[in-house]
Amino acid sequence: MKLSRTILLGAVAAATFGWAAQAAEISGAGATFPYPIYAKWAAAYAEKTGIKLNYQSIGSGGGIAQITAKTVDFGASDMPLKPDVLAKDGLAQFPPVIGGEVLVVNLPGLKAGDMTLDGPTIADIYLGKVAKWNDPEIAKLNPGLKLPSTAIAVVHRSDGSGTTFIFTDYLSKVSPEWKDKVSEGTSVEWPVGLGGKGNEGVSALASRTMGAIGYVEYAYALQNKLVYAKLVNHDGATLQPGSTVFQAAAANADWKSAPGSYLILTNQPGKESWPITGATFILMHKKQDDPVKGKAVLDFFAWAYKNGAKMAESLDYIPMPQNAVAIFEDSWKQIVGPDGKPVWDGHSS
């Protein structure tokens, strides 16, 4: 099933919710990485409260641009903004969930988990140094697997993307050559490959291109029935993707000591840690011109923290632990209205 690019859910009987009648819709834009869980949460929240979420899945770069320009109530990015950038633009950020990225491969007869890849090999593929699927570098990782001489069709994001930031940050940690020649970012100068817009675009391009390899959020691989590879992690363990290994990578996250919630989770140590794991982030202005809208956004994410864990797990995202949620909700005190008072009082309306 191909995911649509915008969530737009009806506000059922919003007039019965007092202040909610004034904020029957909240708008957001940005990362495609968390789109599946935002869609699931939005459907459940609309059914319960009548408040709809209009979320445009346009990529983290677009989300950062739109919240900076104040054209949406919140932005979404898989690349956390550094504390100095947050301060310069008057923004606050907090992460709703953690997820994992996978490498998807399109070869005849290949099933999910048949192939194993490691970081240096993935970097060499994306550098254009490994150009055929039967290259000795891939064959060494896959003894016994019959590899064709098919040319590798590299697929990457064409838009500004936090998914790309997580992926290229990982490659920069495992390949000195990648770090020197390409480095990390939401957009990079790709040495080779075809570009697709959003996780949706990469999924679609990889699924219809023979010999393709691409990086996507795990939920997209599952929902589009794409074949993904096992990965060798920081400690040399070969892992299948899934909630257990994503959770292991997230286990060492020290949110209390992370200024502005700036934390990157790629290439974490641990035998069970998935190597390409990352949190996704919500961006809001600290000074809210419309405190009702600001409160409505925070109400939605407070509800998601409290009620959305099982929905997140059903899509193999990792919910935030309660001790971390307390830290994030406490940070919401800095989000204030024109009167200087916090827009969220610790209770959802």
Image (tube, helix red, strand yellow):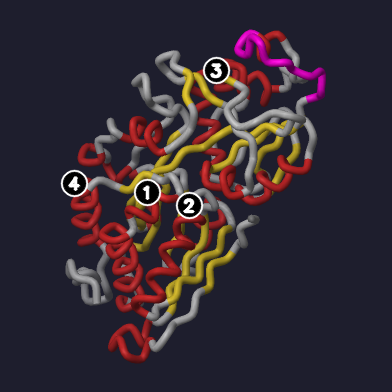
Question: Is 148 a magenta residue?
Answer: yes
Q: Secondary structure at mark 3?
A: loop
Label 4 sits on what residue type?
Asn
**Residue picked out by circle 3:** 175
Q: Is disc 1 surrounded by few (<14), some (14 to 19) or many (20+) residues within 10 Å?
A: many
Tally of numbered discs: 4
**Mark 2 to mark 4: distance in Å?**
22 Å
Question: Which mark is first along the chain, 1 or 4?
Answer: 1
Q: Secondary structure at mark 4?
A: helix
Q: Count residues near mark 4 (Cα–Cα under 10 Å), then give few for <14, some for 14-19, many for 20+.
A: few
Residue at image position (26%, 60%) is: 306
Label disc, if present, on residue 323 of the rendered structure: 4
The residue type indicated by label 3 comes to: Ser
Q: CA distance from mark 1 to mark 3?
A: 28 Å
| Percent of width and height locating residue 241 | 48, 33
Q: Quadrant of residue 349?
A: bottom left
Which labelled disc corresponds to residue 97? Answer: 1
Q: Residue at x 35, y 50 (%)?
A: 95
Q: Which residues are magenta?
A: 140-151
Q: Is residue 237 above or below residue 169?
A: above
Residue 81 is at least partly visible in this image: no
Which residue position holds label 2? 34
Question: What amino acid is at disc 2?
Answer: Pro
**First of labels 1, 3 by sequence position:** 1
Task: Say which of 228 and 324 sits in front.
Answer: 228
Name the disc covering residue 211, or none. none
Gap between marks 4 and 1, in whole Å? 14 Å
Q: Quadrant of residue 207?
A: top right
Q: Earlier in the sequence, mark 2 or mark 4?
A: 2
Q: Is residue 168 left or right of residue 97?
A: right
